[in-house]
Image (cartoon, grey):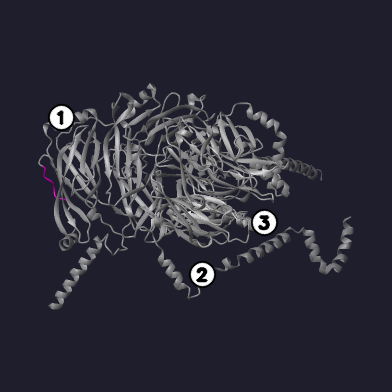
Amino acid sequence: MAGEKVWWILTVMAVLLATASHHHRAGAFQSDELLIEQDDDLVGAIGGGGGGGVGVDPVSPPRSRKRYSEAAESDSKVQFTLEHAFGDSDFSPAGTFSARLKTWSHGPQTLTKLRFSRNALTEVDKEKFEKLLQEDDFYRIRLPSNVLSPPGRDYIVASIKARCLPRDSLDEHFVIHMDGVNILSVNYGPPGACPYPRQLKLPAKWSFKSHYYLKSTDLAPRTPVFTEEITLGENGEAEVVKPPERSFWAKYWMYAIPLGLVVMNAVTQAMNMPPEEQAGGQAASQQGAAAAQRGPTAVRRR
Amino acid sequence: MAIRTSVLFVLLFLSSANLAFSLYEDQVGLMDWHQKYIGKVKQAVFHTQKAGRKRVVVSTEQNVIASLDLRHGDIYWRHVLGADDAIDAIDIALGKYVITLSSGGSILRAWNLPDGQLVWESVLKGSNPSKTMLIVPMSFRVDKENLIFAFAEGCLHAVSSIDGEIIWRKDFAAESLEVQQVFQAPGEATVRVLGYLESSQFHTYEINPRKGDEMKHVIVDFPGGLSGDTVLVSDDVLVALDATRLVLLTIFFQDGEINFQKTQISSLVDDFHGLVEILPSKLADMFALKTNEFLVLARVTDGGKVELVEKIKEAAALSDAISLSDSQQAFALVRHENEKLRIFAKPVHDWNMDLLKETIKIDNHRGLVQKVFINNYLRTDRSHGFRALIVMEDHSLLLIQQGEIVWCREDGLASVIDVTTSELPVEKDGVSVSKVEQNLFEWLKGHILKLKGTLMLASPEDVAAIQKMRLKSSEKSKMTRDHNGFRKLLIVLTGSGKVFALHTGDGRIVWSLLVQSLRKSENCDYPTGLRIYPWQVPHHHAMDENPSVLIVGRCGPSDDAPGLLSFIDAYTGEELNSLVPIHSIVQVIPLPLTDSTEQRLHLLVDANQRAHLYPRSPEALSILRPEISNIYWYSVEADNGIIRGHASKGSCSHDAEDEYCFEPKHLWSVVLPAESEKIVATGTRKINEVVHTQAKLIADQDVMYKYVSRNLLFLATTAPKGSGEIGSATPEESLLVVYLIDTITGRILHRMTHQGSQAPVHAVFSENWVVYHYFNLRAHRYEMTVVEIYDQSRADNKDVLKLVVGKHNLTSPVSLYSRPEVIAKSQSYFFTHSLKAITVTSTAKGITSKQLLIGTIGDQVLALDKRYLDPRRTVNPTQAEKEEGIIPLTDSLPIIPQSYVTHALKVEGLRGIVTVPAKLESTTLVFTYGVDLFFTRLAPSRTYDSLTEDFSYALLLITIAALIVAIFVTWIWSERKDLQEKWR
């Protein structure tokens, strides 16, 4: 029984260690492993029904992460407001993002579980938006550049041509680029294409349907290092590196080809020899007799 | 046997040639040229040895030290010191060493005078930055210790001139003494140091040169305060200005006593105003003052009085005094009087006598005289002759002797700021034909020679003749447009405010112009040129007009200084128009719109992000109006780490209604976290870059679509600590982040972090890829990374059926407001060199494969095939991938010695590489500038679309003729034989 318990504790610790190294980024130990943090970086959600301001739960994070978060970090809630402006008008609050701020034991803070509730469009806003649609002007939004001490150094502004948004409702898509608690930039626009030329189209439903993601930086792929080859070479030094066995032709082609040529040459020469000469050659051995025999025939011919 | 080996070599070469670009030895100089410069001369020291070696040693503002031939102005030897190793002083010691003091006085070097070899180098350490002085005593006795004194960083060092050993040093900074002058009078044994303490006490020290101990120290209080300008008039008189700069102080410090005498400047010259400066020219018994209007020469008489000698209104320059004999000293004065340079050599003691008086006519485009150095020689009639080395406003260097310009160096070309090109005029009919007729015999002779060369029958003299002919080929230096587009004008803006047009054929200067609006004037104090743009490129319907270029500059160093524009005719080199001063200029946007005279519309963005339209014509406005809603621009606040995007909101109405000006509307912003990221490099695509196809066929008959957008900005940031020198940050605290930002919508399309990497970052952006170079602290090596982005929104256009039916979105217009669906692929490789510049080849249609041109730290240009920087390289590429041309993955990029574009040459002080497409698709023109200039043309995939220049047409013709003759001969033979057969 006791052994089983120890075993169980060990497993839990191993799991914890494994997950911990997964998140270890700026700490003292730097893993060689290529970190793929899709799970963390893309906490996505589709918030529906701008009128009600009710956000749908974001994709639930994987279990291991949850366990880790319980173990090592402290949690707090943060909220930051989205403001919008119609054309050149001033910015006014349009909705609230809320998220959980995680403080890792070794310093950096990150946001997870982003939720968004958009305020309902007022009648005035609707009119303004319609005007934007008529004029093909910009609908602008802004966010603070630091979620802890808004507005940070400056606001993050993004704009879109108003005519890109209307579908059935007003569809919008946020990708918020984060670095710790700083917002770098927000990619704002329709969730799909915005074909050009932009047609005037009024939405059927005057409410926003929001899609939103948090995105932190990707890690660059590491330069491939071919250490294997080097160690192989070092090991190989002791043994004599045998050249691969080559075929007969590969070894001796340089002798074979001239030989072949010589043979060919000889054969063709032999073939080209005129028949008389050939005969003469054959006759050489029996010259005496042949001469005696031929002499009279030749004479006879004449 | 030899033939067989050479054949083998050729085969080997051909097999490797698809990867490497290289040149045969005899092709050097055929399509490339190299010019050596030194830059604007700061100081010159003549040495005229008896042995006929007449040379002058100069130091320049481009940190070059060079020895020039006095007869021809050629460079005997030259050293380009590093960019942060500015030369403070030079002198000649022992008659055989050139001594240089550089890097704010911290490095003392001796170079061998005849060949420029470094003899020794000493590092001088001091505590405080201060004036720097180099004193080489004029002792001709060999038995002396031959000490040189260098004052730098508050310390006086005595250094042995033989081996550079520091014999002693004395620190004056500890006593907080501001040392003004250090000198050793010719007859005296002691070294004197003169200085101020807190600008109110005057100190003189006499120091034993052998040991460095203080022999005498005298202090005098001066309540009026002293300013920093001083000049030694003689061995015991110093002239200084007091703190108000209105009173001249003559300080006598003879025999341990110090006396002052004050002279009001207004008593010397009655009508001066503005700031007075003392010129540092050493004229025995005299000194020169400079006010903002004129130059004043004054003399200190024996009684200690100051008297006016001459007041010079026009531009003038003074040399130091040189001694002609023991008792006689002379100096040169150069006065610039409308297009004429009057040179006087005067003895020091008699102003009214002229030892030399010469007048030289000088081109107006050289500007005013700035510096003069003189040297004397003995004429054949035993009288004194003088030669003067003159530095002009355009940084050119002239040697004047016997009333004429012996030689002239265009050293303004050592400080190229920006380059553009212009097409040459179209060839007129009838010109070429007569030329050919004239030289028909020559032409034939040339071809026969070439033929001999190809058939390996040529004698060494013939080979030399062929080489010479190839180099001098008049084809390449003609002043008309050629079919292949190799001949162009390179229009070069230099730091001196002079614009040169260079011919690409042989690098000669076609015209040069000192731009009037880039010269100092009342409404523009410190004009500097920034960029040069093609302004008017005649085409189609405006063929008769000459092309022109636009020069953009600003009056002062800061971004919000007023701007200036100048328009220059590219054929004649005349300034057509100029606008000085105008609003500030931080960005120039050439628009893809032209008016009826083919003037390109430009938007100039000022410091308040307002966009101003040029040319300011109603026609241009009417062209721009419909497009203005599709024009966006962005601004980068590099110190703040904020990037903002703007669009036009309507006409400006800040002070007066200006319809050519557009108010910005803030559309987007990207705020980088200030504590962890600092912008170190940016990159954008070239405006005129052509992409042949968006689709890229990959291995298994699949297709990928390049994300080709002109509006992408590459940005690299590092942690603030990592933006300094390599080693200033540890791998843990250093971080390199790269961004690809769409500049229309401000969207970050790709963001990637390299841990443990740091600046310097060099980047090049082309088509859908960006390549950047940085230092990896973990691997202790430089790395290059490639990022390629592909458009996924078009990825489903692969279905042939869809294409046939027409259900594809390939022809629909692209809107950047759509959600970007891109994927980025990247891969990093180690690269051995650190680099100074990086660019990419560009061709007319963008079909030819690309090469990266890398300006290495050794001042050479290396061509690296883009295929090596392909993110899709794998360790074991499949057969299909191999066919596509994917090279097996390696961890580092190869440096193939044959692929140095500059072959054996060096482009000293390399700063930039410019590529220009030729008309021939396979070829790109490459111009590299630094202190030197280098031009060549490259064919990254070899010249697949033309025969090489040395192709022998004669040989081809002769072969064909011979074959025809052979056919006839054999035909006749066979006929005859047939006949004989039939008769048998």
Residue drawn 50% across the image and 41% down it: B279
- Which chain is indicated by disc 1? A
Residue drawn 72% across the image and 49% down it: B460
How packed is label 2: few (under 14 Cα within 10 Å), some, or many (20 or more)? few
How packed is label 3: few (under 14 Cα within 10 Å), some, or many (20 or more)? few
Q: Amino acid at mark 3?
A: Ile
Q: Magenta segment: does it hold B358?
A: no
Q: Is residue B492 visible?
A: yes
Query: Which quarter of the figure has residue A23?
Result: bottom left
- In 3D space, how far apart are the residues under numbered discs 3 and 1 (Cα atoms)? 88 Å
Q: Which residue is mark 1?
A: A127
Specify the principal SS of the magenta part: loop
Q: Is A232 placed above or below B926 here?
A: below
Q: Are marks 2 and 3 on the same chain?
A: no
Nearer mark to the viewer, of 3 and 1: 1
- Which chain is indicated by disc 3? B
Q: Amino acid at mark 1?
A: Glu
Q: Which residue is mark 3?
A: B3
Q: Earlier in the sequence, mark 2 or mark 1?
A: 1
Q: Which residue is mark 2?
A: A244
- In 3D space, how far apart are the residues under numbered discs 2 and 3 (Cα atoms)? 32 Å
Q: Residue A75 vs residue B69: left or right?
A: left
Q: Amino acid at mark 2?
A: Pro
